[in-house]
Each structure stands twice: as C-alpha cells, then as structure tokens.
Image (tube, rainbow, N blue to C red):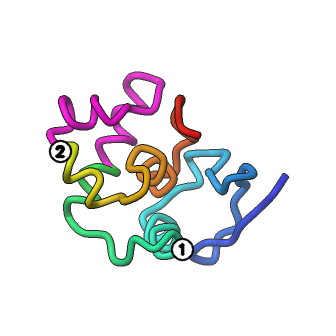
C-alpha cells in the first residue's frame, strides 16, 4: 500500500493519490493536497465545495456528482470548473479526502 505524508501525518493512498481512509483527512492535509495539484490557496468557495462533498458523502454514502454539487450544493457548474480546473469532481474529491468519483477517468 502506498503512503504519502501531508502536514506531518503519513496516510495511505491509492495509486492515484486518493486517501484510502477519509478519517485521516484534516484541513491541513487538504491545503497540502491543493498545493500539490496546483490549486493554490483554498478560498471560501473551495471550502464550501469541500465541506459539501464530505457532508453529502457521509449522508448519502457516495461521492456527489457535479450535477449534485450544482443543484444541492449551490455552486454553479462554471464556478466548479474555475475552482477545480481540469476535472472538478475528481480534484475536489481528492482535496476533500474522498475516493475517486464514479465515472471519472
């Protein structure tokens, strides 16, 4: 099993860098992952998406789609692509400490 160290904590990750255990996640880890994938400093809107994804996953048991983030999370699709360019569902899930969303390549 692969591991990475973020914010002084060693965590297990899959072959694409997604945390294997979402309970290992914390905000400092999210900030380091965001920097690693080129998102820079996380804004209030980033945190809105990240917190929505984590809470929705806890309630529903599956990672929310872009459509769900838009409709239930209240973040327009264009904003999702601006916040997490090059794959908002995948990058947001990575930063949020969740697994890879279904349907992402």
- Say which residue appears at 65% left-offset and 70% top-offset: 9
Q: Is residue 7 left or right of residue 59?
A: right
53 versus 88 height, above or below: above
Image: magenta residue range: 51-74
Question: Residue 61 appears at what percent x and percent y?
Answer: 47, 24
Q: Nearer the viewer, residue 94 or 51?
A: 94
Q: Specify the label residue 75 is tagged with.
A: 2
Q: What kind of element bears circle 1?
A: helix
Residue drawn at point x = 28 percent, y = 29 percent: 68
Which structural element holds mark 2? loop
Question: Is 69 one of the magenta-colored residues?
Answer: yes
Q: Nearer the viewer, residue 9 or 98?
A: 98
Mark with earlier residue (1, 2): 1
CA distance for labels 1 and 2: 24 Å
Residue at x 59%, y 54% (from the top left corner):
24
The residue located at (44%, 52%) in the rendering is 96
Specify the quadrant of the image occupied by residue 21: top right
- State whether residue 97 is above or below residue 4: above
* Helix, strand or loop for the magenta stretch, by majority: helix
* Quarter the C terminus occupies: top right
Q: Which residue is at the front of the view, 59 or 70?
A: 70
* Furthest residue in direction right, as rendered: 1
Residue placed under numbered mark 1 in the picture: 36
Q: Residues within 10 Å of mark 1 (few under 14, many from 20)?
A: few
Residue 52: image tag: none
Q: Relative to 64, is 21 above or below?
A: below
Within 10 Å of the Cα at label 2, are there few (<14), some (14-19), or many (20+) other Cα atoms? some
């Amino acid at each position: 099993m692969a591991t990475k160290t973020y914010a002084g904590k060693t965590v297990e990750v899959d072959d694409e860098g997604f945390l294997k255990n979402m309970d290992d996640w914390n905000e400092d880890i999210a900030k380091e992952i965001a920097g690693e994938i080129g998102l820079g400093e996380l804004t209030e809107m980033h945190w809105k998406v990240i917190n929505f994804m984590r809470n929705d996953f806890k309630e529903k048991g599956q990672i929310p789609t872009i459509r769900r983030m838009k409709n239930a999370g209240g973040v327009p699709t264009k904003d999702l692509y601006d916040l997490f360019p090059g794959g908002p569902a995948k990058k947001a899930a990575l930063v949020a400490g969740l697994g890879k969303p279904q349907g992402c390549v």
